[in-house]
Image (cartoon, rainbow, N blue to C red):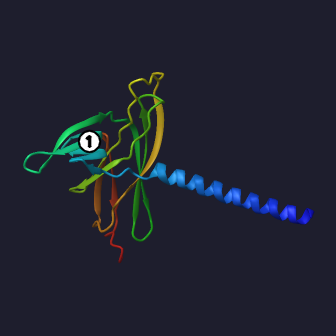
Amino acid sequence: MLKSQAVSFKSRVSWFISFGCTTILLFISTMLSAAPAVFTKGELVIPEGAVISGNSSAYYSDITLAMDEQGSLVITGASKNSLVTVEEVDVMVMESLPLQVSLSVSGFLSVPCVALLSPAVSYANNQFTVVLAESTLGPAETCIAVLEPFQTTIALDVTDLPAGTYLVDVNGIETEFILEMDNSPLN
C-alpha cells in the first residue's frame, strides 16, 4: 500500500513538473514571439515598424493602414515611440563558419516602467542601421522619472556578405567591424 502511494505521488509530481515546464515554455514563447500584422474589416494593423531614411530613424507602434477608393493602403494612424539612449555598442564576431556577428548594446530607458521593443535592423551599402525604441506608458500610468539601464544583444545577418569593413549605427552611435573573408555558408 505504501509503495503504491509512493508511485502515485511520484507520477503526480512528474506530471506537475511536466505541466509546469510546458506552461512556462508556452508563456515564454508567447512573450518572445512577435505579434503578426492583422488585416480585417478593410484595415491592416501592424504592431511595430520603423522608418529608416538617410540619417533619420523613427519607430512606430499600432500602425493602421486602410484601403482607399482605389484599393491602395494608406496610413491612417500610428503611435510614435521614443528612441532609447544608447551609450555603448560592442561588436562580437564569432569565428564560426559561416561567421556570425552580434551587437552588445547598452544604454538607458527613459523610466523603469517601459520596456525595450524589438530592434529594427536594416542593411544597405555596407551599413547596418539599428533602431531601438521603448514602449509607452498607458494614459493612466505614472512612473518615477529616473533612467533605467538596459543591455541587449542583437544578431546581425551577415550571411553571404563579402570580406570588407562594415559600419554599424545604433540610434546614432556608430562603430564598425571587419569580415576578414567572404561569409558564404560554403566557405
In the displayed image of the protein, which residue is found farthest to the bottom? Answer: 186
**Quadrant of the image for the N terminus?**
bottom right
Position of residue 156 relative to residue 185, above or below, is above
Residue 65's place in the image compared with 109, above or below, is below
For disc 1, the neighbor class at 10 Å (few under 14, some 14 to 19, many from 20) is: some
Q: Position of residue 166 (x, y in %)?
A: 29, 56
**Number of numbered discs:** 1
User: Residue 5, located in which quarter of the rendered image?
Assistant: bottom right
Nearer to us in this view, 128 or 167: 128
Residue 8 or 127: which is nearer the viewer?
Answer: 8
Q: Is residue 16 above or below residue 172?
A: below
Give the residue at x 39% y 42%: 117
Give the percent coordinates (x, y) of residue 148. 48, 31
- Residue 23, located in which quarter of the rendered image? bottom right
Q: Residue furthest left?
A: 70
Task: Name the image quarter holding residue 109.
Answer: top left
Q: Secondary structure at mark 1?
A: strand
Residue 144 placed where, x, y %?
48, 22
Q: Residue at x 59, y 52 (%)?
A: 24
Q: Residue at x 22, y 55 (%)?
A: 124
Residue 119 in the image, given as x and y percentages of width and height = 36, 47
Query: Quadrant of the image for the C terminus?
Result: bottom left
Badge 1 amino acid: Ile
**Residue, disc 1:** 63
**Residue for point 45% across, 65% down:** 95
Decide which of 154, 135 is in the foreground and name it.
135
